[in-house]
Image (cartoon, grey):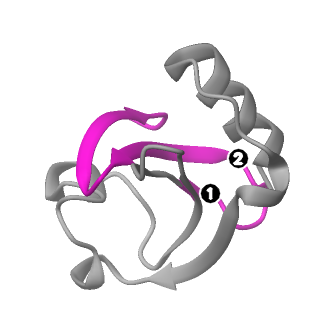
């Protein structure tokens, strides 16, 4: 799990201190047709496996903002293929690691 990565990124990028015990985590397999464009736009899905494993880490800050970092992993190697950050239901940044 990428918990240390999430906590470090929240501090470094967004200047928000996160306690590990305040973080939620879940993982699910999805087929492309089940994925909302907010999470992964269709043009990015074309480059990712089908079905795909999405892991999500979530946190609600002291102002009530919900932060979600979602990432797609290659199931066998656990290599990160895609990353998306969502704040209060709005995608704020993404990174795709495959061509």
Horizontal side, residue 15 vs residue 39: left or right: right
Residue at 82 percent of width and 50 percent of height:
20
Residue 1 or 72: which is nearer the viewer? 1
Q: Residue furthest toward the front?
A: 63
Category of crowding for the residue at label 2, using alpha-carbon neighbours closer than 10 angstroms: few (below 14), some (14–19), many (at least 20): few
Q: Is residue 94 magenta?
A: yes
**Of the image marks 2 and 1, the number of the one nearer the N terminus:** 1
Horizontal side, residue 14 vs residue 77: left or right: left
Dot 1: element: strand
Quarter of the image for residue 33 reads bottom left
The percent position of residue 61, horizontal first and vertical second, equals 53, 46
Q: Which mark is residue 79?
A: 2
65 shown above or below 12: below
Horizontal side, residue 43 vs residue 94: left or right: left
Q: Which residue is mark 1?
A: 73
Q: Quadrant of the C terminus?
A: top left
Residue at 29 percent of width and 53 percent of height:
88
Q: CA distance from mark 2 to mark 1?
A: 5 Å
The percent position of residue 65, horizontal first and vertical second, equals 39, 49
The percent position of residue 41, horizontal first and vertical second, equals 19, 54
85 shown above or below 60: above
Magenta range is 71-99
């Amino acid at each position: 799990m990428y918990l240390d990565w999430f906590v470090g990124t929240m501090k470094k990028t967004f200047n928000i201190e996160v306690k590990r015990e305040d973080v939620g985590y879940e993982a699910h397999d999805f087929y492309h047709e089940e994925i909302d464009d907010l999470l992964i736009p269709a043009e990015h899905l074309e480059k990712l496996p089908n079905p795909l494993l999405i892991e999500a880490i979530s946190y609600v800050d002291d102002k009530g903002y919900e932060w979600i970092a979602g990432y797609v992993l290659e199931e066998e190697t656990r290599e990160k293929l895609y990353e998306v950050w969502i704040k209060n239901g709005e995608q704020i940044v993404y990174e795709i690691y495959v061509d």
